[in-house]
Image (cartoon, grey):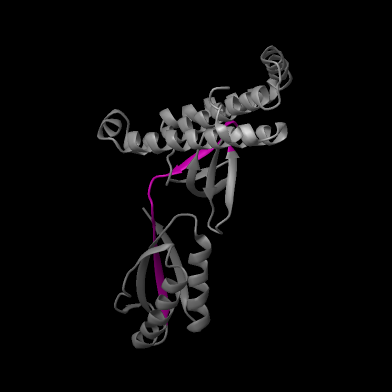
Amino acid sequence: MKKIFNIKILDNLNFFQIKFVKFFLYIFAGVAFYKIIKIILQKVKKNKLSKKVLQSNKIDILFSIILSIIKYIIYFITILLILRDVFNVNPALIVTATGVLGLAVGLGIQGLLRDFVSGLFILFENQFNIGDYVVLNNIKGKVVNFNIKNVKIVDSQGKINIIPNGKINNIIRYPKKYEKIKFHLFYSGKYNEIKKVYSHLKNNILERYKRIIKEFSELSCSKKVSNFNYSNFTIFLTPFNDEVVENLKELFQKNFPGILVYIDKLQ
């Protein structure tokens, strides 16, 4: 390493300035190396051969795990080099200290290994993928990230929930990206009146929940059912958004007095 830092600019620096420069050069080298590896992995991930070897829904997760492992290895090596070349710590002492430290944090590493092994089982058993809607340990949401340590899911409130892989003991995977909800409307007024209310609420709901609702069907024509007029419509929205459905039901009841609203979740 001495040859690397044997540059003229260091000749005019004092002892502490040289240490300072070396410290940040190692940091810069570590970060740059990690960025280069990341770019290479991204190109490999986009390669057609990768898509043939692995299912497309596993590629993102697998490369995320590999990148996490490489990141920790680079951090470890960078710290060792800084200790040796900047703080002049004896390499033999580093090895000894590493061994002692390894014993001291053994229990902590067990947790990391548990998370890693659990993550591999989740990946290769295809229990869920990034973008899936799941229930993990009774927490409902969309999987937005999965790595060597944990899973991140976003719930219907937009909150990010982080769950360690090793602590996941209950998985429910929602099979579809959208739920189909059918609204049954029973009312005593005229069809034109309910149509007007429906159009107003539809526009407001779509504007308010445009990222959640995929499709909003037209209101069906009025039919006579007992002493009521009957119409229906369906919406397609992302799973686990029951509050949106209840909100829409309450808006109909508020804007059209006497209306009866029943909801069906369709497969």
The residue nearer to you, when weighing 116 against 266, is 116
Magenta segment includes 176:
yes
The answer to which image quadrant residue 265 occupies is bottom left
Q: Position of residue 190 (x, y in %)?
A: 37, 87
Q: Position of residue 123 (x, y in %)?
A: 44, 31
Q: Position of residue 208 (x, y in %)?
A: 47, 72
Q: Which sits in the foreground, 223 or 177? A: 177
Q: Is residue 3 above or below residue 93?
A: below
Q: Residue at x 38, y 55 (%)?
A: 178
Residue at horizontal 32 percent and vertical 34 percent from the top: 55
Q: Residue at x 44, y 77 (%)?
A: 204
Q: Is residue 247 magenta?
A: no
Left or right of residue 10: residue 105: right
Q: Which span of residues is magenta-colored?
A: 164-187
- In screen coordinates, is 143 left or right of 231? right
Towards the viewer: 193 or 128: 128
- Residue 75 image position (x, y, % from top left): 58, 30
Rendered position, 261 above or below 15: below
Quarter-wise, where is residue 187 in the image?
bottom left
